Structures are given as structure tokens and as C-alpha cells.
Amino acid sequence: MKNGLSLGDSAVIEAIVTEEMFAQFEGVVVHPAYSTVSMVYHMEWAARKLILPYLEEQEEGVGGAVSLKHLGMATLGSNIRIEAIVIELTPDRVLAKVEVRHGDRVIGLGEVKQIILNKQLIQEKLTPRVF
């Protein structure tokens, strides 16, 4: 990774809850509210925004771990704000604390770990082995 990423750096994304973000399984809506699956996606995306400016051409970030507590609901049309903050940093790992807010309420808290790997290594791991 390039130099520059530091502890405390942050990245923010904002979204408006759509029907596609509702809690659902196999296309059947369970609750017309912002789903945990969508929250994980947004948490990972906010954390990824932290590393993008610092990846070398031959590097890529891959998900290493996600943990979250889904604490509250947001309904159709709600504005949500997701902020990721770097809390641990090594040359090949970035851990971010992530907070999801709907207005003044915290509706999600968690952490996202990203591992920085060489793109060629990733490709090798994705190539099927012939036995």
C-alpha cells in the first residue's frame, strides 16, 4: 500500500433506503425495512473507500471479516449515513470501525477487516485446480 492512510482516517457513504434493500429471502420481503444484508454491503463499501486511494497498481483489498450489531430500523426513503474509521493498520491489513446512522439514531455498529493482497495471488487462488 502507498503511504498516507492513518489511524483515524474516515470515509462516508450516504444512501436512501429502497425496496431492493428490504429484508427478504428468495425474493419474498420479510420486513419493509433496511436489511442486515444491505447494512453489511454498505459497511464494506465505506471501509473499501478508505483503502482505494492507497492501493498500488498490483494490489487489491479482499474482505477478511465483518462483525455488526443491527440496532435499529430504517424504512423506505430513509436517508442513511455510513462512516468507516481506521482503528488498526498494518502494511497488509486495515481494520475499520463502522457506524450506520439514520438521522440522529445509530442503527448499526461494527467492524470491517480488509486484507491487502497482490492481484496475481488473488487470481491464482481463484483459478480452479485440475486434479
Image (spheres, helix red, strand yellow):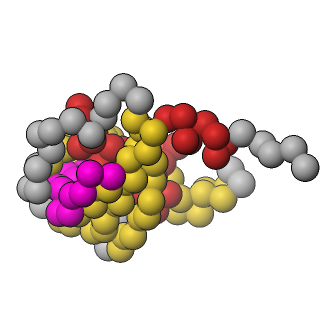
Residue 37 in sight: yes
Horizontal and vertical percent for residue 107?
28, 66
Which residue is rendered at x = 23% and y = 31% of the image? 53
Question: Where on the picture, by quarter, is residue 109?
Answer: bottom left
Q: Does 72 appear above or below 75? A: below
The percent coordinates of residue 129 (x first, y second) are 80, 45
Tell me which corner region of the image, top left, top right, bottom left or bottom right, holds residue 16.
top left
The magenta segment is 82-92
Give how far across and how far down residue 102 sits, in percent.
23, 56
Residue 87 falls within the magenta-colored stretch: yes
- Magenta-drawn stretch contains 95: no
From this viewpoint, is residue 108 visible? no
Residue 38 vs 127, above or below: the answer is: below
Residue 65, position in %: x, y?
43, 64
Give the residue at x 26% y 51%: 91
Against 61, residue 34 (above or below) is below
Residue toward you, 62 or 76 = 62
